[in-house]
Amino acid sequence: MSHVQRHSYYEADARERIAGLVDAGSFREFLGPARRMMSPHLAQLDQPAAFDDGIVVGEATLQGKRVLLAAQQGEFMGGGVGEVHGAKLTGLLRRAAETQPDGVLLLLDTGGVRLHEANAGLIAISEIMRATLGARAAGVPVVALIGSGNGAFGGMGIVARCCTTVIMSEEGRLSLSGPEVIETVRGVEEFDSRDRALVWRVTGGKHRYLIDQAQMLVPDSIEAFARAAADALQADAASSDTDTALSALQARHAALKARVQAWGDCRDGLEIWTRQGIAEPERLPLLDTDAFLAATADRSLP
């Protein structure tokens, strides 16, 4: 296998993440740059285009398990989803429902919809969500990996929460509206996007793990993400059985209602961590991953 020891997931680009994640020589790309499947809209707006439209999709093996995977290029338009970008991801998920691989890995690095293709991007997000749930209904686990510079925001933040499992590092961020959007709409009193510590205490991987919006937290290394992803490739029986899926959905709705009641007035992750019964919550941002997991193992969840 080709795992680069302690190679930063955060600092790698999409193709480097794939190369370090999967078994050596096993990756086969679909619709690669040579096919020049580019956005039809960007040239009309005098915007640069990419031959792969900012996303790499294909198939490989991970510790011998057959997977389909997609990795967003965060350096291209912030990983924004446009028509072709979204179609490649939707097609990959539909292929998963048909061919039944051991799982789908989504390496997310995106601010959401590409504003240059607003309507096409919004439609693409809805198609991606439907295809994600379709793959899960077919029993294929869909795993989101979030540890990049852009994180997963906007519509792709919703897609992440449609997945079977979310794996994050401390450096990853997950949310619907980004900090700047919240500040613009609601004012700096609501959310100060320049307070980087606050941003990470609200959207960062540690906080998302503590409130169960990420199921696994790993150090910033491709090796750690690969190990966690392999562990997450379990058959998605909860989604393929209708009665079980309905029960799981109802339980999730009840949990969300309880959390709104318990935490709805909190304005900072620190306040939630305190209510979870975590001792000295202010020290959590300074702990490495192993120490953090040990310190928060007994936290409460409504």
Image: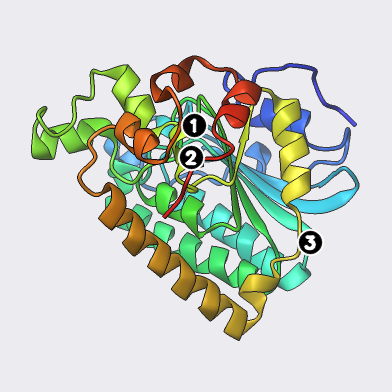
Residue at which label 1 appears = 206
Residue 86 visible in image: yes
> Foreground: 68 or 29?
68
Task: Please name the residue shown 48% across and 40% down the image.
Answer: 210
Residue 201: quarter of image? top left
Residue at which label 2 appears = 210
Mark 3: amino acid: Pro
Task: Please name the residue shown 45% across and 75% down the image.
Answer: 250
Q: Is residue 88 above or below residue 146?
A: below
Mark 1 neighbour density, 10 Å: few (under 14) some (14–19) many (20 or more): many
Quadrant of the rendering where the N terminus is positioned: top right
> Foreground: 257 or 244?
257
Identify the mark at residue 101; answer none if there is no mark: 3
Task: Please name the residue shown 58% across and 72% down the image.
Answer: 134
Q: Nearer the viewer, mark 3 or mark 1?
A: 1
Residue 132 in picture, x, y percent from top left: 56, 63
Residue 277 in picture, x, y percent from top left: 43, 37
Q: On the rendered structure, is 75 left or right of 13?
A: left
| Mark 2 element type | helix
Q: On the rendered structure, is 194 left or right of 75?
A: left
